[in-house]
Image (spheres, rainbow, N blue to C red):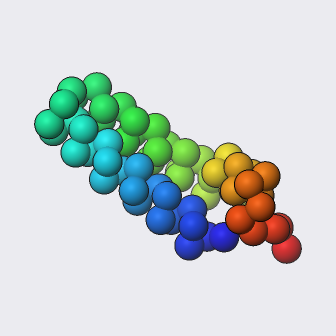
Amino acid sequence: MHYWIRGIAGTFVLVSLALGYWVTPYAYLFTAFVGLNLLQSSVTHWCLMERILEKLGVAQRA
Protein backbone atom coordinates (compact mmCIF):
# COMPACT_ATOMS: atom_id res chain seq x y z
CA MET A 1 0.00 0.00 0.00
CA HIS A 2 2.75 2.48 0.89
CA TYR A 3 4.30 2.08 -2.58
CA TRP A 4 1.00 3.14 -4.15
CA ILE A 5 0.72 6.14 -1.86
CA ARG A 6 4.30 7.23 -2.51
CA GLY A 7 3.83 6.85 -6.26
CA ILE A 8 0.61 8.84 -6.28
CA ALA A 9 2.05 11.60 -4.06
CA GLY A 10 5.16 11.84 -6.22
CA THR A 11 3.07 12.03 -9.37
CA PHE A 12 0.84 14.74 -7.87
CA VAL A 13 3.89 16.80 -6.87
CA LEU A 14 5.58 16.51 -10.27
CA VAL A 15 2.38 17.30 -12.19
CA SER A 16 1.55 20.29 -9.99
CA LEU A 17 5.11 21.62 -10.31
CA ALA A 18 4.88 21.34 -14.11
CA LEU A 19 1.49 23.05 -14.10
CA GLY A 20 2.85 25.78 -11.85
CA TYR A 21 5.77 26.41 -14.18
CA TRP A 22 3.95 26.26 -17.51
CA VAL A 23 0.31 27.12 -16.75
CA THR A 24 -0.37 29.01 -13.52
CA PRO A 25 1.53 29.65 -10.29
CA TYR A 26 -1.62 28.74 -8.37
CA ALA A 27 -0.84 25.09 -9.08
CA TYR A 28 1.94 25.38 -6.49
CA LEU A 29 -0.82 25.47 -3.88
CA PHE A 30 -1.63 21.86 -4.77
CA THR A 31 2.04 20.98 -4.22
CA ALA A 32 1.80 22.52 -0.77
CA PHE A 33 -1.45 20.65 -0.11
CA VAL A 34 0.19 17.30 -0.94
CA GLY A 35 3.15 18.14 1.29
CA LEU A 36 0.92 19.11 4.18
CA ASN A 37 -1.06 15.89 3.81
CA LEU A 38 2.14 13.85 3.86
CA LEU A 39 3.28 15.65 7.01
CA GLN A 40 -0.14 15.26 8.65
CA SER A 41 -0.25 11.54 7.91
CA SER A 42 3.19 11.03 9.42
CA VAL A 43 2.01 12.63 12.67
CA THR A 44 -1.53 11.25 12.94
CA HIS A 45 -1.05 7.89 11.16
CA TRP A 46 -4.20 8.62 9.12
CA CYS A 47 -4.04 8.97 5.34
CA LEU A 48 -6.97 9.90 3.11
CA MET A 49 -5.34 8.31 0.05
CA GLU A 50 -5.03 5.04 1.95
CA ARG A 51 -8.77 5.08 2.61
CA ILE A 52 -9.52 5.87 -1.04
CA LEU A 53 -7.29 3.04 -2.25
CA GLU A 54 -8.95 0.62 0.17
CA LYS A 55 -12.39 1.55 -1.15
CA LEU A 56 -11.12 1.02 -4.70
CA GLY A 57 -9.93 -2.44 -3.67
CA VAL A 58 -6.25 -1.77 -4.36
CA ALA A 59 -5.17 -3.22 -1.02
CA GLN A 60 -6.72 -4.22 2.24
CA ARG A 61 -5.61 -2.99 5.62
CA ALA A 62 -3.61 -5.47 7.67
Q: Residue 51 location, x and y as percent? A: 74, 51
In this view of the protein, can residue 19 be seen by the observer? yes
Q: Residue 13 location, x and y as percent? A: 36, 50
Frontmost residue, 25 versus 60: 60
In this image, 10 relative to 21: left or right? right
In this image, 19 relative to 22: left or right? right
Residue at (22, 36) in percent of width and height: 20
Q: Residue 33 location, x and y as percent? A: 46, 38
Q: Quadrant of the C terminus?
A: bottom right
Q: How many labels does the image show?
A: 0
Q: Quadrant of the N terminus?
A: bottom right
In this view of the protein, can residue 46 be seen by the observer? no
Seen in the picture, residue 15 relative to 20 is either above or below; the reply is below
In this image, 47 relative to 19: left or right? right
Q: Residue 2 location, x and y as percent? A: 61, 70
Residue at (64, 51) in percent of width and height: 49
In this image, 17 relative to 31: left or right? left
Q: Quadrant of residue 53?
A: bottom right
